Amino acid sequence: MRSGFPYRTGDGHNAYFNHRARFHLNFFPIHTWGRALAAGKLDHMRSFMPSGRVQLAHVQEAAERLKAVGALPTPILRSSIIDKSVGCVCHFKGEHLQRTGSFKYRGATNAVGALDAKTAANGVVAHSSGNHGAAVAAAAQARGIPCCIVVPHTTPAAKIENIERYGARVVLCEPTQTARTEASAAQVKAMGATFVHPYDDALVLAGQGTIGLELHEQLGRDELDAVLVPVSGGGLIGGIAVAIKALRPSVRVIAVEPQGKELRLCFAQRQRVLDAATANAPIDTIADAIRTKAFGPIPWASASDLLDPTVLSVSNAQIGEAMRVAFVEMKQVVEPAGALTLAALLAPEFGALRAQGLKHVAAVVCGGNVDLELLMRHVAPRS
């Protein structure tokens, strides 16, 4: 059940801010990992199976690992104006207010925290469009281990700066999945490091699933009919689905995608990859954090049968408008991917879902790392 104090949004109406997340913006001391390890708080969790189908117990272990290093929940935000516009009660899960500015901190912290001391000493490598890289860098910095992040040269400057502030070494590559994979493999070999995949990793998926645990704790039984989740490689929605469907089987977990992903067809045909020739091609969208076309094998195995067959697709124009609404009505700065679920709620297509009895909907706001130039392009007053 909810407990806490009201949070006022720009529209002058109450938004719910869970008291347990009150200090979610605080940066945790870099020695927290060391204290937790020394105290033996993480040792019992190192037996986590690194591959295969993720289950609720794995997500609960991830939650304990995050708690051990001082991670705090993110708040639920509300706007009565948006509720009125959408036609139902909307609970916005503020992952843009998570440390490093996105939900990625959860999975990265869980994966890096699972490494034994000897393995961790060689460092970690990741490839990323920005948010995962910053999260892995922060987790590595907290453990005091080396970190290298491979980043496409098309990544927004704000996201590269966010990675570098945590002390990681950044290597630029071409904006293709093949280039990212090859550059990462080279760094792993040179360093003797461990690779942390952005979504196709059981530990990462379990870490993201802690969002589902928090939604279960923060919203009462009569306050959640569905969860809208932005989707790229599937780590976020996969983890949330594992947690939510285990705890509240009747709640629908609905994917929101940028136009061009064609996830609905994958679900209909129960096939992870429809066209192998285009599976690694990036989607043409302003949402730079979610350009991956195909689900990863581990998210697909863990959660494809848990997800609602309905998929909501949104255009660049709808994403940009949602960024503006978040800024004007809720006074929240979100990146394009972070605006995806709000865009879906505001789209005419959501009306058909609402008519199916959806009265209370949670929407995951996945990130807030955005270049100011792009932000102002969408939120500036219209002439």
Image (tube, rainbow, N blue to C red):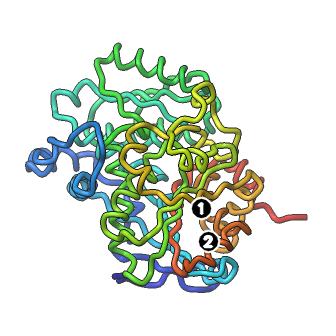
Rendered position, 49 above or below 177: below
Residue picked out by circle 1: 341
Inspect the image, locate mark 2, and give the three-letter code of the amino acid beneath it. Leu
Residue picked out by circle 2: 353
Rendered position, 117 above or below 374: above
Rendered position, 209 above or below 172: below
Q: Identify the image quadrant of residue 353.
A: bottom right
Q: Identify the image quadrant of residue 64.
A: bottom left
Q: Nearer the viewer, residue 21 or 231?
A: 231
Q: How far across and how far down the image is residue 324, in percent?
A: 72, 64
Q: Secondary structure at mark 1?
A: helix
Q: How far across and how far down the image is residue 151, in percent?
A: 53, 29
* Horizontal arrangement in the rendering, residue 191 relative to residue 284 (left or right): left
Q: How far across and how far down the image is residue 182, in percent?
A: 48, 17
Residue at 58% from the left image edge and 76% from the top image edge: 356
Q: Secondary structure at mark 2?
A: helix
Tally of marks: 2
Inspect the image, locate mark 1, and give the three-letter code of the amino acid beneath it. Thr
* Mark nearer the viewer, 2 or 1: 2
Q: Earlier in the sequence, mark 2 or mark 1?
A: 1
- The residue lying furthest to the front in this view is 269
